[in-house]
Image (cartoon, rainbow, N blue to C red):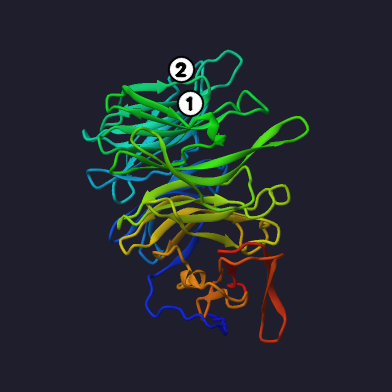
Amino acid sequence: MKYLFIILFATIFLPLKAQETFSMRYFFERPAALCSCISITDTAYYAVGVTNDTLPPFTAGNFFAKIRLDGEIDFIEIYTDTSKTLEVWSEHLIKTHDNGFAAVGYSFEEDMSAFLIKYNNQGDTIFTSFFRNSFYPTEIFILPRHLVQTEDNGFMISEWFNKPQGNTWNSEVGLTKIDSAGQIEWRQYYDDELSDQPRSMIVDYNGNYVIGSWNQNLSTQNMWFDSHARITKVAPNGDLISDYKTPESWGLIGPADGLVATDDGGLIVASRKGVEQDFVSFADIYWHTYIFKLNEEMELVWGTDIRSSRIAPANFFNQLIELDDESGYVAAGRIHDTLYLENKFGAKGHIAKISTEGDSLWHRLYHIVDSPSANTNVFNDLKQTPDGGFLLCGEANGFIQPDLEDYPRQRAWLMKLDQHGCLVPGCHLIDDVNEISQQQSILLYPNPVIDYLNIYVGDISIQKQLDFQLFNANGQVVKSFTSTTSAITHLLPVYDL
């Protein structure tokens, strides 16, 4: 095994004792894989996601993995069916009352259907319950988004579906209640004159279901858009309690991508603020990430732009959590750091912390340097670990050709960060220094390095770009890349050196 030793001269010293961190990519000997959702116990991590079969007809299936606390796979079960897909894309893997797990997904056979899949703690499937659009066969599209176990050991599922609208495609938000054996008990939907797409669901302090969605007219308009965060509160029996949309005076507001109920009756909402971008014959909405708080009367308490990045169509959060020590909230998703039209596929994993009063405390970006052209790094799910750190899962891929060693390019991604959101221990100390040179703002970890060299660039002003070059013992450049981004960790592969 080869080791690469790095010598770094700096005036910032790393802490002697730090939480364990890691970044792991998995493909399970398959052409493609991604991690959709995770669950955490004191002794292990559990992950579920999507993977492709290795033999024709390349049907997409789902995997269930138990992962040790150091990121190594304990065991994995893969479920495929040659007659249909079995795709779990939802960001919710819940631990059930009987010590098992459950998730939701969708399937394509002749038509589209949704399913609830229940596993035991060894990853064996207890049952898979399929159901179709409420208006089937007139309408086919249905996508389950979120899952909560009910007090009677059943399940509540939020779903995104379309209903008959003549020649107009219009989607809605619905709930499906399923019993402990996987049978449907009741279904309800909550329509609006605009289209809706559910993006989050929680249970509030009163036991009611709160659904966060995107309320918009983009499916019927190619410019002059309406866009709102919609928050729908529903009783356990499915009855509508309240329905809220962000007012037009706020401008273009994106989905309620994440929700947290506060003990004062309010809500923390992870969302986006948009700007309509006009082109020759159409328009699009480009976004900044945004978090705001509503009080019990659904009035704005505060709102915070998390990062003043360049706007892009695909800047968003996928998950929002409250911290166990009640010091604030952490959100995770993806963000573009370059002009979208120059690099349409380039995205970085994004994690940010905000205080209970709405102050932006820190944000971090993560980028695996796979190829010189573009990489897509996305966090789909986020959980706090027992040591106060964070576990994130998603996908990390780049444009890699099949004949190269790093094929396949799309891989499931699991990352363990410390309580400051750092993969490189001490990265928060760099950001706490008021005046620091560009050279001093860079940390390298680990030393020695075996597979990936993690390069942290502090939250500094970059006038043009940073050029990184890695030399071998003969003074030859063996790796190089450029960056225009701060507060970012670049994960540079060195296992091939």
Viewer-nearest residue: 133 or 8: 8
- Cβ–Cβ below 8 Å for labels 2 and 1? yes
Q: Which residue is mark 2?
A: 135
Percent coordinates x, y for residue 486 in the rendering: 60, 64
* Tag nearer the camera, 2 or 1: 1
Left or right: where 404 falls relative to 325? right
Give the position of the C terminus as an image quadrant: bottom right
Left or right: where 450 falls relative to 276? left
Q: Quadrant of residue 227?
A: top right
Q: Quadrant of residue 173?
A: top left
Q: Which residue is mark 1?
A: 161
The residue sitting at the top extreme is 166
| Residue 117 in the image: above or below residue 55 | above
- Residue drawn at (57%, 81%), measured in percent from left and top? 4
| Residue 223 in the image: above or below residue 135 | below
Task: Tell me, yes or no, if residue 32 can be seen here.
Answer: no
Q: Amino acid at mark 1?
A: Phe
- Residue drawn at (45%, 43%), measured in percent from left and top? 292
Q: Amino acid at mark 2?
A: Phe
Viewer-nearest residue: 177 or 314: 314
Task: Tell me, yes or no, if residue 25 can be seen here.
Answer: yes
